[in-house]
């Protein structure tokens, strides 16, 4: 499983980094950064929460 982040939609709320800190970070511009190329089973639940919690719908699971 992979997660894609659309940094043009990201407004820097940081919910993703709070919900899944091993997978997401926020750069100096306040935009989401995906830290893992592949999402392992141990992170799936947190990533799903982050995707559904993003107010800008900037995250997508594939």
Image: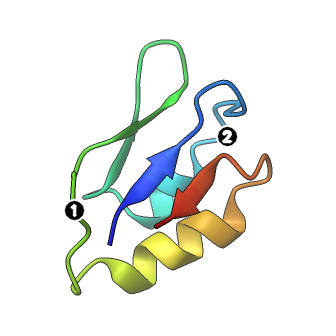
Circle 1 residue: 38
Label of residue 53 in the image: none
Q: Position of residue 29 (x, y in %)?
A: 52, 13
Which-is-in-front pick, marks 1 and 2? 1
Furthest residue in direction front, as rendered: 62
When asked about the image quadrant of residue 38, the answer is bottom left
Point 26% across, 69% down: residue? 39
Q: Is residue 31 visible?
A: yes
Q: Is residue 7 left or right of residue 35?
A: right
The mark nearer the N terminus, 1 or 2, is 2
Q: Is residue 17 visible?
A: no
Q: Position of residue 53 (x, y in %)?
A: 69, 66
Q: How is the image coloured?
A: rainbow
Viewer-nearest residue: 38 or 45: 38
Circle 2 residue: 13
Viewer-nearest residue: 33 or 6: 6
Q: Is residue 35 left or right of residue 12?
A: left
Q: In 3D space, how far apart are the residues under numbered discs 1 and 2 (Cα atoms)?
A: 23 Å
- Of helix, strand and loop, which one carries label 1? loop
Packing grade of label 1 (10 A; few <14, some 14-19, many >=20) is: few
């Amino acid at each position: 499983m992979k997660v894609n982040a659309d940094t043009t939609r990201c407004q820097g709320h940081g919910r993703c980094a709070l919900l899944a800190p091993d997978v997401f970070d926020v750069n100096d511009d306040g935009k989401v950064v995906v830290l893992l190329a592949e999402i392992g089973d141990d992170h799936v639940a947190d990533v799903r929460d982050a995707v559904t919690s993003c107010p800008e719908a900037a995250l997508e699971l594939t």
